[in-house]
Image (cartoon, grey):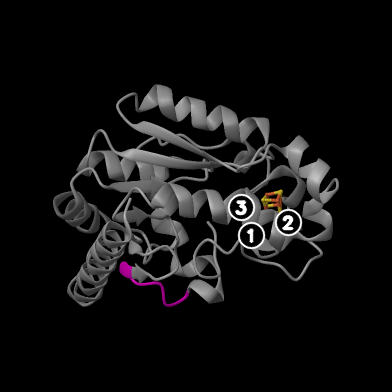
Amino acid sequence: MTTTEHNQADQAKAELKAELKALALAARAELSDADAAQALAWTARTFGREWIVAANMQDAVLIDLAVRAAPEVDVLFLQTGYHFAETIGTRDAVATVYPQVRIVNAQANHSVAEQDLHEGPRLYERDPDRCCFLRKVVPLRETLAGYRAWVTGVRRVDAPTRANTPIVDWDEGNGLVKVNPIAAWTDEEFNDYLTEHGILENPLVAEGYPSIGCAPCTAKPLPGADPRSGRWAGLAKTECGLHGGGDK
Ligand code: SF4
C-alpha cells in the first residue's frame, strides 16, 4: 500500500469512527428508557450483521434476547484457556440450543503454556491485570475491530462502578457502539426471565457461584456476601478492564 493509500485508509477509519460516535451519542439519549427488546431491535436495524453479543456463558439470557432480534447473531466468547469445564460445557450447550448463532471464540495470541514460558507460571496470581489484558482485553479488541457495535449483559446492579450504565453508549477504547440492553434490569427481573423462558444456565450457579469468571480467579462468595466478591477474592481487583473498568 502506498503512503497516499495509507492516509486515505486512516482518514476513512477516522470518518467511520466519528460517524459511529455521533450515532451512539444520539441513541444514548433517544433510547435511554428503551427496554431490552427495543434496544436489540434498534441494534439489528442499525447495524445489520455488523454487531456481536458478548457472552461469558454464565447463562444464555442475553443470547436468548438477541436471537429474537437477529436469529443468526454472532456471539463472542473470550476463550481465555482458564475456564471451568462447566463454562465450556455451557458454551457448547448454547451452540446446540441456538444452532443458528455463530459462536466466535476469541483467543489470546499465546496459549496458556506459551504465556507460562514467557511470563512465568500463574501470572494471574502475580499480575492479574496483565493476565486479563493479554487473555481478555487484547483478544476482545482484536475481535471487535470487525464490527460496528457490541452488546453486553452489564447491569447497573452488578456493582457501584456500573450504576450509571446507559442502554446505548460510545466505547472509546474499542471505537464502536456499545449496547447494554439489560442495564436497567433488577436481579428479580433477570431471574424471572431465566425461569419463565427456561433459559440455559451454567451449572456452577446452582452450586453457589453467582459470578463466574476464569477458574483460578473465581471462588464461592461467603453466605450473604456481595455476589461478585468471589472474583479475584483477596485482591483489590474487581474488574477485567473490558468495560472501561468492567467485565461481566
Ligand atoms: S480472570 Fe484471572 S485467569 Fe482469567 S484472564 Fe483474568 S487474571 Fe487471567
Asked whether the beta carbons under mark 2 and mark 1 sit within 8 Å of each other, the answer is: yes
**Point 40% across, 71% down: residue:** 172
Ligand 1 within 8 Å of disc 1? The answer is no
Q: Is mark 1 on a helix, strand or loop?
A: helix
Residue 130's disc is none
Mark 1: amino acid: Pro
Report the residue marked by disc 1. Answer: 227
- Distance between the alpha carbons at the discs numbered 1 and 3: 6 Å
Secondary structure under tag 3 reads loop
In this view, the residue farthest toward the left is 45
Instruction: Say whether disc 3 or disc 2 marks the residue closer to the N-terminus.
Output: 3
For the stretch drawn in magenta, the main secondary structure is loop
Residue 219 seen: no
Q: Name the residue under label 2.
A: 221
Determine whether label 1 and label 3 are within 8 Å by CB. Answer: yes
Residue identifier under label 3 = 211
